[in-house]
């Protein structure tokens, strides 16, 4: 989904798709007239939609009904290479794969894969129906709860649909969030910038604490009618037309990614948990936090789930899948 200030990246986004050989990707959805016009001009395969987070799932439901496996990519993602082979390899034995984070025990719905089956279609349908009936809820929390992973929402266990076999993509080197990774460029498939602008899809006012601090000025200016102008972003570097046209990452982009590399401890669970203040100090250094942050949309706020899930210590290297 794309709209508003993110529209300035559409040309670079479309060029990057062509560069890695993925020009047939469908953009679902362009949420304003400018986004649809730019997408049509630079890409061609575009869906015009109204402003609602449910747009993220409705087209996927149709594809699953048609027997098509689907891979969702948020717009704030940069493809380093064509992802199909890596997805197929990761999906062996699973019907659903989620993004995951190196530093927090949190499933990420910025990118995910769903294999078409009656079970996965019913699971997604029931989740979308629940979101429609609970418009105040965050869709990423809902996914975590519907997969029975750390998050808790207002639904009983008896009401949940059967859960597909699921696991997570490699969060260490292949399918990474930009905040941290382990640095193997040969394995790198995509970079998720976790832009955080989606708060506006929920109609949140400026006082809402779930809006990232970096976005506060933007939403306050929007409420007052002022023109704040587009905020600078790392995406400006990656979706620069010259950079997007390079088959391989150029030196500038490699340096940006190298700055996010974390040194991995020998055993994550063998050391004491840091305080929240120490944890956030380490996020800015080249050391990996000694223990993951517990999952929650708001940092340092107690979640409805007091502990960690089965992925917390080993992440994508955890044996088996959730069945």
Image: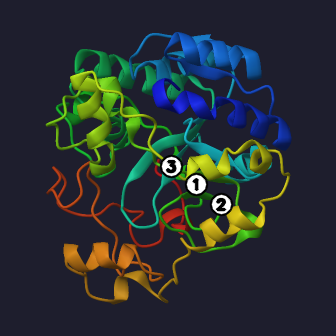
Q: Give the residue number, with chain letter if any, for mark 3.
A: 233
In the displayed structure image, the side of residue 300 where residue 43 appears, left or right: right
Q: Nearer the viewer, mark 1 or mark 3?
A: 3
Q: Which mark is residue 174?
A: 2
Distance from the alpha carbon under mark 1 to that under mark 3: 25 Å
Residue at 19 percent across and 34 percent down: it is 206
- Residue to which mark 1 is pinned: 169
- How packed mark 2 is, by other alpha carbons closer than 10 Å (few <14, some 14-19, many 20 or more), is many
Is the Cβ of the residue at disc 1 closer than 8 Å to that at disc 3? no
Q: Earlier in the sequence, mark 1 or mark 3?
A: 1
Compute the Cα span from label 3 to label 2: 22 Å
Q: Which of these two is toward me, 272 or 95?
A: 272
Q: How far from the left and from the top, in percent, is residue 193?
A: 52, 50
Q: Earlier in the sequence, mark 2 or mark 1?
A: 1
Q: In the rendered view, does 174 fall on the left or right side of 31?
A: right
Q: Position of residue 145 (x, y in %)?
A: 30, 40
**Residue 300 seen from this side:** yes
**Cα–Cα gap, marks 2 and 1:** 8 Å
- x and y, in percent, of residue 175 in the image: 61, 55
Q: Tag 1's secondary structure?
A: loop
Do the residues bearing badges 2 and 1 touch, measured as CB atoms within 8 Å?
yes
Q: Nearer the viewer, residue 283 or 60?
A: 283
In the rendered image, which quarter is residue 307 located in?
A: bottom left
The kind of secondary structure element at disc 2 is loop
Circle 1 crowding by C-alpha within 10 Å: few under 14, some 14–19, many from 20: many
Nearer to me, 180 or 93: 180
The residue shown at (34%, 36%) is: 146
> In percent of the image, x 21 and y 24: which residue is there?
224
| Of marks 2 and 1, the one in the foreground | 2
Q: Earlier in the sequence, mark 3 or mark 2?
A: 2
């Amino acid at each position: 989904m794309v709209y508003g200030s993110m529209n300035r990246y559409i040309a670079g986004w479309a060029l990057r798709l062509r560069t890695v050989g993925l020009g047939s990707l469908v953009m679902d959805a362009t949420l304003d007239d400018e986004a649809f016009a730019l997408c049509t001009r630079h890409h061609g395969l575009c869906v015009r939609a109204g402003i609602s987070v449910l747009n993220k799932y409705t087209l996927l439901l149709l594809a699953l009904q048609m027997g098509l496996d689907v891979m969702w990519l948020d717009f704030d993602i940069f493809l380093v290479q064509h992802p199909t082979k890596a997805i197929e390899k990761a999906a062996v034995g699973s019907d659903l794969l989620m993004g995951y984070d190196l530093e927090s025990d949190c499933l990420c719905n910025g990118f995910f894969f769903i294999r078409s089956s009656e079970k996965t279609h019913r699971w997604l349908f029931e989740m979308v129906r629940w979101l429609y009936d609970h418009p105040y809820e965050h869709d990423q929390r809902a996914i975590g709860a519907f997969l029975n992973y750390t998050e808790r929402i207002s639904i009983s266990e008896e009401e949940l649909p059967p859960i597909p076999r699921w696991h997570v993509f490699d969060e260490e080197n292949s399918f990474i969030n930009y905040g941290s990774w382990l640095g193997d460029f040969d394995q790198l498939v995509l970079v998720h910038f976790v832009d955080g602008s989606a708060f506006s899809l929920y109609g949140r006012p400026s006082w809402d604490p779930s809006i990232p601090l970096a976005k506060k000025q933007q939403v306050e200016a929007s409420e007052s009618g002022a023109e704040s102008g587009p905020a600078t972003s790392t995406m400006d570097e990656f979706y620069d037309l010259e950079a997007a046209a390079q088959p391989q990452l150029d030196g500038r982009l490699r340096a940006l990614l190298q700055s996010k590399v974390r040194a991995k401890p020998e055993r994550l669970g063998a050391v004491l948990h840091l305080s929240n203040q120490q944890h956030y100090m380490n996020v800015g250094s080249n050391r990996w936090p000694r223990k993951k942050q517990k999952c929650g949309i708001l940092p340092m706020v107690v979640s409805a789930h007091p502990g960690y899930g089965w992925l917390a210590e080993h992440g994508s290297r955890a044996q088996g899948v959730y069945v």
